[in-house]
Image (spheres, rainbow, N blue to C red):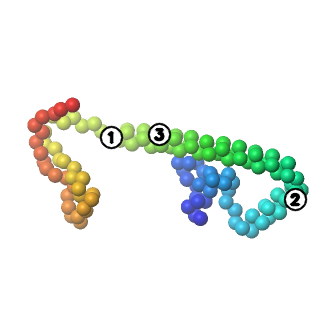
Amino acid sequence: MALRTAYKTPLGTTPYKLVYGKACHLPVELENKAWWALKEMNFDFDAAEEVRFLSINELEELRLEAYESSKIYKDQTKKWHDAKIVNKDIGVGDLVLLFNSKVKVFPGKLRSRWLGPFKVLDISP
């Protein structure tokens, strides 16, 4: 329940609100709201239908807004990440280290993830 009701920064809302279109309420609050809704609508089905139609449209707008917020957040994160990447020019004769990707599959406590140093003999595009 805490996951569904917690505010998520990338979405700009809670997952519960994305699914149901409203904030999550405790059962006591729901009884009061249900009683208020019945009193407000006075069992008028036409008014209830109109309110439901409007709430569905609001829900679609909310989901679209969350999608846009998520896209903006991802773009900003990508921009920040790309700004941190430093291009390194490697020339012939330089010493380099090779990343050992097998260490991630079979981790060792004190095992190094790098192999080398190796001397660069040729550079190809």
Q: How many marks?
A: 3
Query: Marks 1 and 3, how far apart in space?
Result: 16 Å
Calculate the distance from the C-alpha at mark 3 to the C-alpha at mark 2: 47 Å
Residue drawn at (23%, 64%) of the image: 108
In percent of width and height, residue 15 lies at 59, 54
For the point 62% across and 56% down, the residue is: 16
Helix, strand, or loop for circle 3? helix
Residue 44, given in percent of the width and then of the height, sits at: 88, 53
The front one of 76 and 50 is: 50
Measure the alpha-carbon separation of dots 2 and 1. Answer: 61 Å
Height in image: 83 above or below 37?
Answer: above
Query: Going from the N terminus, do you reach mark 1 or mark 3 first?
Result: 3
Label 2 CA crowd tier, 10 Å (few <14, some 14–19, many 20+): few
Q: Earlier in the sequence, mark 3 or mark 2?
A: 2
The kind of residue on which mark 2 rests is Lys
Element type at marker 2? Answer: helix
Q: Quadrant of residue 35?
A: bottom right
Asked if the residue under mark 1 is in contact with the one under mark 2, i.e. CB atoms within 8 Å, the reply is: no
Q: Which residue is mark 1?
A: 85
Mark 2 sits on what residue? 39
**Nearest to N terminus: mark 2 or mark 1:** 2
Query: Quarter holding the C terminus?
Result: top left
Tag shown at residue 62? none
